[in-house]
Every structure is written in C-alpha cells, then in structure tokens.
Amino acid sequence: MKGLAKRIASISPSLTLAVSAKAKQMKAAGEDVISFGAGEPDFNTPVHIIEAAKSALDRGETKYTPAAGTLALRRAVCEKFRRDNGLEYSSSEIVISNGAKHSIFNACFALIDEGDEVLIPAPYWLTYPEIVRMLGGTPVFIPAKKERGFKISPEELRAAITPRTKLFLFNSPCNPTGAVYSEAEVRALAAVCEEAGIWTISDEIYEKLVYGSVRPFSFAACSDWAKEHTVTVNGVSKTYAMTGWRIGYLAAPKEIAAAIASFQSHTTSNPNSVAQAAAAEALSSPEAAVEEMVARFARRRTAMLERISEMERAYCIVPDGAFYAMLVVSGVYGRSFGGRKIQDSVSFADALLDCSKVAVVPGAAFGADDCVRLSYSLSVKEMLEGLDRIDAFLLSLI
C-alpha cells in the first residue's frame, strides 16, 4: 500500500520551527538561551479586545457563523479598508479565515492552476513557495538586491514575466527583510502587472508596523484595474498582538471572494466565533495600544541597528517595517569555531545556538543564504545581550 500523497510528501520542513523547537528544548533543560526567532509580538492582546471576547461568550456567541465570517466583522474590515487604504469594498467581497496564512492559501487555491508560474521577490516568507508548489504551481523568484533595500524594480518584475505567469505574490512591509515599498514604487509594480494582465496577492499583514518616513501603500489602491485583479490579505495577528486568535481576512472581487468562501465552507468552515468578535473590536476601536507597541518596537529597532553598526564581521540593511532585521553574515563563511566549519546560514545558526546559546533563523529559509533573520520582539536588555554574544561569536571564528 502506498503512503503519503506526492503533494504533501514534497513539503519542506520549516527551518523557523526547527530552530524554535531546538531553542525551547535547550531552555527547558535550563540553558540560558536568547532567541531572535520570534515571529510574533511579545505583547499581550490589549485588554479591551479580550473583554470583547468575554462579552461574546456571555452573549452565547459560540455557534457556527457564516463560512466567510460574521457580517459584523466583515463590515468592520470594509470600514478598515475605507479608513486606512481608501478602498471601498462590500461585505460580499470579504472573507474571514483562520489567520492570514489561511487567507493566502485560499487565495492561491482560487487562482493557481497546474503549471502556472507565480512571481515571488526574494527574500520571501518561507511559506509562499511551499503553498505554490502544493497547488501545482511553479514559484519564480526575483532577487531583491541588498543595495536597493531588498526591493525589486519594475524592470526586474517585467523581465520575470512569461506566458505562463499567472500571479505576483507581493509583501510589503516584508517578512523577513522589513522592506517597505513607497507609494510610487507600488504604483510602478502595479503598472507592470496591468500591462501583463497578471493577478496579484498583496500580503499586508505588517501594514501598521512601520518606522521612519516611509508609509506602506495598498496594491489594490493603485487603480480600478489593480483593485479588480488583486487579492489583499491582512489580519489582526501582528497589529493587535493576536497571533493565537487566528483571524485573518482577504478582500477580493466578488466572484473570487464567493469562490473562496465556498471552498472554505468545505474545508475549515467558519473561523472561531469568539475570536471574530474580538477581531471586530480590534478593527473598530481607537489604536492607542497599537501606537504604543509600534513605539516600543521602534526603540528596539534603533537599539538593534546601533549595536549591529558596531560589529566588524556582519552588517544589516536598515528595515523600515515589521520587526525583523536581516543580518548579513556571509563574510565569515569558510571560517571555523572549535573545528566546526561555517559554510552557510544553517551551519552558522547551528553553531551560534550550540556555542553561544543564541537562536536566529537561517536566511536559507527565506531564499537569502548569506543572512540570518533577527526578530526584535524581545526586551532591549535581552536583545543587547544576545547581540553581544553574536558579536563575540563572529570575532571568535578563525
């Protein structure tokens, strides 16, 4: 009897989860491990959102909801798009799912056929190519050069398009690089997509986590054509420190949204009813807690960049958004520590964790093997201690 289906047997294990699991195992054994691997805010969900969930429980909102989500939450999402992005959607163009990752999978499932090519700027979030491959598509990577702040140009996008190209998978602010495309840059990319007649999935989950003068711009807001050929994905996980609540959402043309809602009705059905009530409160309330979280992330970002600037054997490209920095460590490849040769980002991360008790995510997971990803979702004190350890490790390599 045959075992696993080819589509699941081909999925690559997550390097981020592997690093996290090893770090947690070492911590559980009593070792003093500092982890830069977190992909979530280290803050609790704001109290008023938690209270909204409690109230929903008291009202008995514990039953099935429509597969696409409650009308209250879909209306709150519509208002969010109108208020923050200047985009008008009806509730029938919104689908609520079990996190933004689920929304991205649903959007890809609705749009990708066997053999379709999907353009993905690299470095990329490691799940993007896995989803594309699962659905029979072919991920085509467009290298985003460090000297341009890990951003691709319209010319590079145009050059990657072939007759088999169906979709552009865009992420700004970006995980893992923190790159944020300006309005002019987004419009230029959207013009190329319109010229070629290809779809876009725009992952905007880190939209509110930006620093400095650059502000993100929603891909669908570029033109009427862009709005009709873009699926915009967002959620409450990062902005409101609600990763465990598992609520993401997408906005799409009505026909696409209806197809996704129908598909979801046969797979997961509706997202958690109580979490939906909490998400509606998050999207509809003043954002003082969000502003405070962003301010704290900004201070950490400054402290991290200042400490990295003092390193002799590594450097990073300044990130404008999210809560990550890509530390370029390829300058030490070929060196050794205790007889262990550092050849790539995986061997670097393994040696760093074993020798210095610091966990980072290998850049190989994101298509950037010359880097490791650092999250600044930890206290400044712990972060600086961790950076000191990284610097000492770098200097110890011979």
Image (cartoon, rainbow, N blue to C red):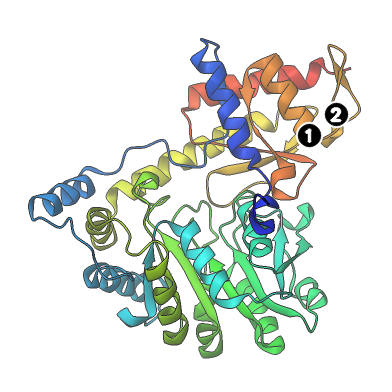
Which residue is labeled 1 in the image?
329
Give the residue drawn at x 80%, y 41%. 370
Percent x, y of residue 74: 29, 71
Percent x, y of residue 112: 63, 75
Q: Nearer the viewer, residue 226 or 314?
A: 226
Q: Residues within 10 Å of mark 2 (few under 14, many from 20)?
A: many
Percent x, y of residue 363: 72, 42
Percent x, y of residue 158: 78, 78
Instruction: Let me know if residue 207 appears in the view.
Output: no
Type of amino acid at the residue the image marks with label 2: Val
Give the residue drawn at x 70%, y 45%. 365
**Residue 83: quadrant of the picture:** bottom left
The answer to whether marks 2 and 1 mark residues whose Cβ atoms lie closer than 8 Å is yes
Residue 166's mark? none
Which residue is labeled 2 in the image?
332
Q: Is residue 244 above or below residue 127?
A: above
Type of amino acid at the residue the image marks with label 1: Val
Give the residue drawn at x 47%, y 64%. 103
* Alpha carbons under labels 2 and 1: distance apart: 6 Å
Give the residue drawn at x 45%, y 75%. 260
Quadrant the C terminus occupies: top right
